[in-house]
Amino acid sequence: MARFRIWTSISATSETPIFGESGARGHKGAVKRFVPGMLLAVLLGITGPCFAASSYAVVSGVVRDVHGTPQMGALVELISVDASAIATVFTDDHGRYRLSSVLPGHYQIRATAAFLVPVTRTNLRFQAGAAAIVNLTMSTLFEAENWLPAQKRRADEPVDDWKWTLRSTASRPLLRLLDPSNDPEDDTATSSTASTTSLDMAEARRRSLQGWASVSGGGGNFGQGGVREVLMLNRTLKDGSSAVMRTEIGDPSQGSSTAASTEMTVGYERHSPLGGSTRLVSSYQSHPELTYGSGTGLQVLRLASTEQLNLGDMVMIDAGTLLQAERLEASRFASEPFVRVMVRPGSNLMVEYRYATGRTLQSSADLDDLKPTTDVLTDAAGRPLTAKGNHQEVSVTRKLGGERSITVAAYHDEFSSAALQGSGLVDRGDLESLSTEGLGMVTDPTTGVFHLAAEGYSGHGISASMVQPVTSSLSAWVEYDLGTALRSSFPPSFAVSDVQSHIAPQTVQAASVSLRGKIARTGTSMKAEYRWQPSRTLTQVNAYNADPGAAYLGFFIRQKLWRGRFLPEGVDAVVEATNLLEQGYQPVLAPDGHTLFLAQMPRAIQAGLAFNF
C-alpha cells in the first residue's frame, strides 16, 4: 500500500531575509524554505475541490411498498443522533431520493407517506466520500393488501374513490403543496444539506393539486340513473395531510321534468405521530327524482369520523361513528358507531374482532370510497326507516406464504329493517295503493329500480375466503358463506302487497369467485366476479362483508386509452356491469296488475370516460 506525505517548514522573519549576506548559502536556504511551500500551495489549489467533496457523503435509494411498487411523493428525512431533522427530500415518480452533502457521522433515515406506516432505518454510519444506498420498504399495519384479504366490498380499482385519487399514477400521494424555498416556517429550507432540487419543486407545484373527472351513462343502480358527471379534486399538504372534494351531478333522462340529482363529499385526513390517522368526511345528497307514497324527493346529510391507533406492531384499534340525517315525508336522525381490534400474535397470523351497527361505515378504509350510497327505506306513511343493525364478528387470518392467505370467520347479525330490491315501472297510483295497504316503497323512475321495506331479522353464520396470486399484479379470490338470508316462497302471480307474509329468514349458502388486479403491459385494471346464491334468495348472505352491488355475474374494467395529439393526457375508458345475466329475478304483481320483479340486485350497466389532470 502506497503512502504519501506532504510536509513543509517555513520559518521566515524580518531578521532572516530570503536573500541574505551569505549569497549562495542564503539563496539555498531560501529555496529550501520556499519551494516546498510553493508546491504545497499548488497541490492544495489543484486538489482542494476533491478534498472538499470527499469530506461529505451522498445517500440515495428507492422507497417502495411491500409489493415492490415505487412510492412517489414519500417524505424522506435525514435524522441526527439527537432526533433533529437535518434534511428532507421527496421521492420522484420512480420512488427515488437523493441526499447530497451529508457530513460524516451516525444518522437515521425515516420515510413517511399517507396511508402507510412510517419506516425508519437506524444505526446508519456515513463516511466521508462514501456513496451509500439505503432502500426503504413501507407497509400498512399487517399489510392488509399483501397478506390480509381486503374487505370484500372493496374492489381493487373502484370507479372513483379517495384512495384511487391519492394513489393514481404511481400509487402514492403526490408531492407536497408548498415550495420550501419560499416557506419561512420551514427550517430546512435554508439548510445546505437540503436535497430538494428545483426540478422537484417545479414538479411539486405542478402536481400538488390533482383532479379527476368522468362522464358516464347507462342503466344505473338505484339513485344512479341518467348521465353522471363527476369531478374530484385532491390536495396533499406538506405535513402529509390530505383534503379531497367530490361532486357528482346526475342529469335525468330526456323528457323528465325532475331536477338533476346532486351529491357532494368533502374529506380530510391527518396522520398522528403514532402511525395512526384521523379522518373526517361529510356528504350531502339531494335526489328529487325518488318518489314514495304521496311525496317526492330525498335529502341525506352524513358526517363520518374515524380514528385509527397503532399500539406498536401488535395491536391496531379502529373506531368511528357515522351521523346521518334523512328527509322524506319526515326527518330521521341516526348514529352508527363501529369498532375494530386487530391483534397480531405471530408474523403470519392475525385475529380480528369487529362490531358495527351499519353497513355503510365499518372501518376507516370505508371512507376511501367517497361515493355515498343511496340506501333508503320508508314506511307506509313516507317516514324514513332506520337500517341500523348489529354485526359482531371474529376472524382469523393466516398467511400461507408469498401472497397467499386464508381467512375463517364467525359472525352474528341483527337487522332492524330489511331492504328488498326490484325493478319495474311503478306509477303514483301503485305507490298510493301500497301505502294504504301498509307497505313502504321508494322508487327511482330514472332507472326503474325500487326499494321495498320488510321486517327485520337476525341470524348467524360462518365464512371462509382465500386469496391466490395469478400474476404479480392479478389475484384470484374465492369465498364461501353459510348464513342467514331472507328467502321467498312465492306462488305464481303473487301480489307484491303480500310479500311480507311469504318471506322468512333461512340458512342458505353462497359462493363467489373473482379475479382482481391489473393486466401487465396493457393498462387494464379489472374486477370480474360471479357470486352465486340459491334461487328465491332476496338478501345477501353475510351482508356486512358482501359488496352491496355484487350479485351473480358482474365486472368492472378501466382501460387506459391511446394518448396522442387528439386525446389529453390520462384518459381512461370505464365500464361497469352488475348481474349482467339478470339472474335471481322473481315476478310479482303490482296493484294495477302488471308484473314487477324482485331481485337481490337488478341488472345495471354503465360506461364512460375518465380524465386525469
Image (spheres, rainbow, N blue to C red):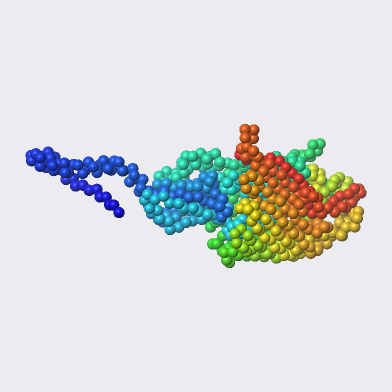
- Where is residue 69 drawn, in percent x and y? 56, 50
Viewer can see residue 116: no
**On screen, residue 426 above or below 276:** above
Q: Residue furthest bottom?
A: 345
- Where is residue 343 drawn, in percent x and y? 60, 64
| Left or right of residue 244, residue 590 in this image | right
The N terminus, quarter of image: bottom left
- Where is residue 303 drawn, in percent x and y? 66, 51
The C terminus, quarter of image: top right
The structure residue drawn at horizontal position 36% and vertical position 51%, both measured from the top left corner, is 128
Q: Residue furthest top?
A: 565
**On screen, residue 321 above or below 190:** below
322 and 118: which is toward the camera: 118
Q: How many marks?
A: 0
| Left or right of residue 379, residue 33 in this image | left
- Where is residue 143 drawn, in percent x and y? 59, 57
The structure residue drawn at horizontal position 74% and vertical position 65%, both measured from the top left corner, is 460
558 and 249: which is toward the camera: 558
Viewer can see residue 529: yes
